[in-house]
Image (spheres, rainbow, N blue to C red):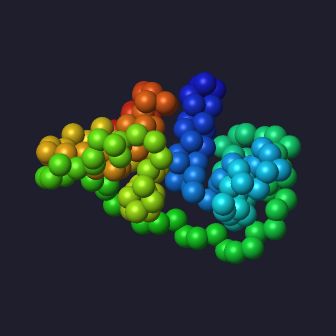
């Protein structure tokens, strides 16, 4: 069904943005240098974002502009994925680290797991505390909600 395809495409775009948000800072709204982002957007990441958008069916002048950017480096190979930990035997993520932007050290460990199979995995682990990936997965789930289509595909 078309609605399911659009939903799946949108989820892929969101997962990509979650994996690469550090490399895609917001465009400056003001000419005031004190409020400008401290880092520039990674051109390779922006191009990969545009390529994904086209591949999953999105089209716009902005996406075309990003595709026209010169790719300065070869695209990195897709990482080998294992299974992310959701719970830990210790206390896990502190309460104040369970909201807002993730801390860079944890994010770098979790980044390779921010793909739909891991974000929609319904594994039920037991433990005392939750991990930083559990927090990111919960953030994704809160905004995107469940997907019967993905749950069915991943259960196979």
Residue 30, given in percent of the width and then of the height, sits at 80, 46
> How many labels sit on residues?
0
Q: Quadrant of the N terminus?
A: top right
Residue 70 picture quarter:
bottom right
Judged left or right of residue 86, residue 153 is right
Rendered residue at 58%/70% (across/down): 76
> In this picture, is 74 found above or below 115?
below
Residue 46, given in percent of the width and then of the height, sits at 70, 57
Q: Residue furthest bottom?
A: 73
Rendered residue at 32%/54% (across/down): 84
Residue 31, given in percent of the width and then of the height, sits at 83, 50
Q: Quadrant of the C terminus?
A: top left
- Residue 54 at least partly seen: yes
Residue 43 picture quarter:
bottom right
> In this picture, is 16 found above or below 74?
above
- Residue 120 at least partly seen: no
Front-most of 68 and 153? 68
Judged left or right of residue 42, residue 113 is left
Rendered residue at 75%/73% (across/down): 72
Judged left or right of residue 15, residue 123 is left
Residue 14 picture quarter:
top right
Residue 69, given in percent of the width and then of the height, sits at 82, 62
Rendered residue at 30%/38% (across/down): 122
């Amino acid at each position: 069904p078309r609605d399911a395809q659009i939903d799946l495409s949108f989820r892929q775009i969101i997962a990509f943005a979650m994996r690469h948000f550090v490399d895609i800072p917001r465009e400056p709204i003001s000419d005031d240098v004190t409020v400008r982002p401290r880092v520039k957007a990674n051109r390779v990441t922006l191009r990969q974002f545009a390529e994904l958008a086209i591949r999953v069916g999105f089209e716009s002048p902005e996406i075309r502009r990003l595709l026209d950017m010169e790719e300065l480096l070869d695209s990195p190979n897709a990482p080998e994925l294992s299974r992310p930990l959701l719970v830990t035997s210790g206390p896990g993520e502190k309460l104040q680290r369970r909201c807002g932007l993730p801390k860079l050290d944890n994010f770098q460990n979790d980044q390779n797991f921010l793909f739909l199979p891991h974000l929609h995995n319904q594994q039920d682990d037991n433990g005392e505390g939750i991990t930083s990936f559990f927090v990111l997965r919960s953030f994704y789930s809160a905004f995107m909600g469940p997907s019967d289509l993905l749950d069915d595909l991943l259960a196979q």
